[in-house]
Image (cartoon, rainbow, N blue to C red):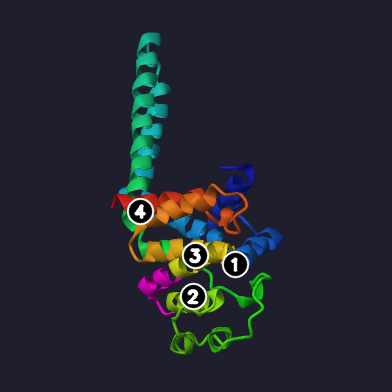
Amino acid sequence: MDNSTSNMSEKLLQYLDGGLAGVEKENIEQQLATDPSLQAELESLKETREALKLYGLKQKVSGIHQQMMTELQTPVKKTGLKRRIIRYSMAAAASIILIAGGIFLYSFLSVSPGKVFSSNYRSYELSTMRDGDTQQVSSVEKAYREKDYTKAIEAYTPNPSTTIKDNFLAAMSYIELGNSKDAIELFKKVLEQDELQKSNFLKDESEYYLALSYIRNKEPKTALELLRKIKDNPNHLYHEKITSKLIRQVKMLKWR
């Protein structure tokens, strides 16, 4: 974890504790309003706190510490003091391990394909389209721009002459309608077209949204392979979106 990520986590903890006010609080809330990954991090911190409360592990560590301090303040022989320090140090260490295990168990049990998908998904905006497609606006694109995803699917006609853009927008429409299976097939088709045409048009976008579709379709193993491929490519448009947290969550889905 880099310093910026660590500092942001500390800020989020302070925000949860009510320790931020004025400009600092406003800045955090503005960032939370526009950054899904930050929202997910905040939810993760909340869940972790709930896990600690649920298992009562925080209170247990506190009790060990208080008992240790009370006994250490009692006059004892030097050898007895050393033994007590060792005993309570081991007890505290065991409790910390138990807490870490509890947090991992809670995260493992609470993670779900739907949660991971929604935390990382953002609707694709056509304004972000790159140069490379000079085709006239199709009925599929028109419907997609109007956010009428059902109409976009109805207007979509799959055939060998269908453009990369229409295949991609139809796939995105399927995602918006909750149909991951058909979205997967169309994203794969876009990638095949790119390979045949020796083009990279919408390639990065298709790979990222294909990975998310695999996650929601409960295919974490395939999703993980694609996410790692994106993460290993610093030139990929979605390279920075593949966080260690996302990789970790998909691994948990794979283990379940």
Quarter of the image for residue 34 reads: bottom right
Q: Nearer the viewer, residue 203 or 172?
A: 203
| N-terminal-most mark, 2 or 3 | 2
* C-alpha gap between disc 4 and disc 2: 22 Å
As measured in the structure, the alpha-carbon distance from the residue carrying label 4 to the one carrying label 1 is: 26 Å
At label 2, which amino acid type do we have?
Met
Q: Nearer the viewer, residue 126 or 8?
A: 126
Q: Specify whether 183 is left or right of 164.
A: left
- Label 2 neighbourhood size at 10 Å, few (<14), some (14-19), many (20+)? many
Mark 4 falls on what kind of element? helix
The disc at residue 13 is none
Question: Would you name the residue on which mark 3 appears?
Answer: 191
- Residue that numbered label 1 is attached to: 201
Q: Is residue 83 magenta?
A: no
The residue that label 4 is drawn on is 221
Q: Are marks 2 and 3 in contact (CB under 8 Å)?
A: no
- Determine the CA span between mark 3 and mark 1: 9 Å
The disc at residue 172 is 2
- Taking the spot 64% from the left edge, 85% from the top edge, the residue there is 136
